[in-house]
Structure formats: structure tokens, C-alpha cells
Image: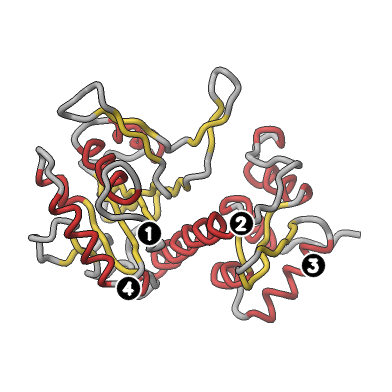
Amino acid sequence: MNPKLTPRDIAVILSVYKCRYLTGSQLERLHFPSQRVMWRRIQALLEFGFIKSFTAPHIPERIFYLDKKGAEIVAIELRIPFEDLEWYPHTRAPKDYYFLRHFLAINDFRITLILACQKNAPDLAGFIPEYVGERTEEGHVKKYIRKQVNDIAYSSVSYSHTPDAVFALEKDGNSALFFLEIDRGGEVLTDTGKGFLKCIVFYLNLWSGTVWKRYEKDFGKEFKTFRVLIVTTSPERLKHMRESVTAYSFPHSQAKRFLWGTIQEHMTTDWLFESVWQSMEATDTNLYRIG
């Protein structure tokens, strides 16, 4: 006999569906007052087939994802056909350490953003993580937020990139669009053909065009422009990032001022909406806030 699901149980199941993989501590932050209460309810959801769990090398916590009964609950709650869910019974628990660490870091930011919005004034108008897919006419699945833009000076040159996430905030009737990049500290900073600077070149050209306007339809909001938020590991690495971006020559120099960086230490509900963001243009000494 299945346990009676509480509203919190359903909220947990929906969070696991939306975030795909969550650790116990992440679920605790979202829904529970203590670790003890979290484990008691999670154990029940595991036993009755609403969620599954696995472990991965070098990640100290168990990781949870959706099982079939949980997917059935999601379909009911979202009022959509079961077959339209982005859930597949053959989904495998990934074991790749680097993939999972990055994936969970994106979810850490998402959870902090949700909790900070609950605590402060901005409303979260929507959040699209990098793994969301869309089916092509040929029947393949591609990442929904992966885009290609042409170089503004050489139309024959193009750049493709998938942000870690795209989200929108709304406050006092004004809406703002953000792209998120979580830097783990391992990518090269000065090569336009790979790593960090290649990502920056993509965003500079994206800012100079109108492709990004498509997100007005996704979020149902109008945006005057967008910001790119880059979260990195240390003040020293952020300094080197800013130097690299500043040294890169680009026709629209003001575009660099729409790229903002900060360090992981500031990614808390108390600090996220404070003036902790720096323009990636090193000559700009102002501190900015996103909320």
C-alpha cells in the first residue's frame, strides 16, 4: 500500500523532475527544516518507487532522480499527458564525475536563486537549464538553449554555444534576462577557439544581434537587453578573466559591460542580490546587483 503523499512530498517530486538530479542537501534546502526530516520522507519516496538514488565517484552524497511512479505524479500535477513528459524509463544514472559536479553546481545556483527570490523582492519569471531538449523535424533531440550566431564582422563565421541556464527576473513591472555560466576553474582563459574566451566571443556577438529576443516568447516578457552572469572559483581567477575579456578586441566595446562576474563565495541567499557583480570590462570599477 502506497503512503499518502503530502503536499511537500509532491513538491519534492516536482523539484526532482525539474532539476533532474538533486542531492539530499539540495532537497533539504528546498523543502525541509532538517536533515533528519528530509531523510525520513525521502526514504518513503524511495521505498514506494517515486524516486531512485545512486552514488558517483568523488561525490560524497547520494543523488536522487525520478522513478516511474514519480513521473506519473508529475503528469497529474502538471496536467499533461504522461508521454509528453521529459522522462524516459531507460534513463541511466550518470557516473561521470565532471559532468555531475557541474550539473549539481548549476542546481546549487538555481536553488539559491529560488530561495533568494522568496526572501527578497524579485520574482523568478522562469528558469531554463542547459539539459532541456526539443525534438527536431528529423526526430532527433537537441538542446533547446543551444544557439548559433554569426560574427558581426564576418558573416561566414559562426559560433555555437549552450549556456548553463537562461532565466528571467521581474521586479516592479520590469523584466530582466540573464544567461548563466558556472566556471569550475579548469578552462583556458585566453584562447578564442576554446574554453572561456570562446564562450565570451559567442555572447558578444549574441548581444550585438537579435537572436536572444526569442526568449521573450519563452518567458512571456519583454527585455531591453540581457546580462551574462559568470560565477567562478576565486578573486584571482575572476581578475584574470576580466583581463582576458578586456584585452579581446571587439567592435562594440560596450558589450563587455553586459558580462558580469562574481565568485562562488557570494552565491548565497544573502549575497546573490547584493552589489557583488563586476563587469568583465576591467576598466569598469563599478559593482552591480541583479535584483
Task: State whether residue 120 is above or below residue 223.
Answer: below
Q: Between 131 and 128, which is closer to the camera in this rendering?
A: 131
Mark 1 residue type: Asp
Label 2 residue SS:
loop
Q: Give the mark nearest the N terminus, 1 or 4.
A: 1
Say left or right for 188 vs 132.
left
Q: Which residue is mark 3?
A: 44
Q: Label 4 vs label 2: CA separation?
A: 25 Å
Label 3 residue SS:
helix
Query: Which numbered tag is attached to residue 21?
Result: 2
Res 218 → quadrant: top left
Q: Residue at x 57, y 58 (%)?
A: 100
Mark 3 residue type: Ala
Task: State whether residue 194 is above or below residue 189.
Answer: above
Between tags 2 and 3, which lies in front?
A: 2
Label 1 residue SS:
loop
Q: Which residue is mark 4?
A: 271
Residue 72 place in picture, x, y as percent: 74, 45
Q: Which residue is mark 1?
A: 183
Mark 4 residue type: Trp
Q: Residue at x 12, y 65 (%)?
A: 286
Q: Label 1 vs label 3: CA separation?
A: 36 Å
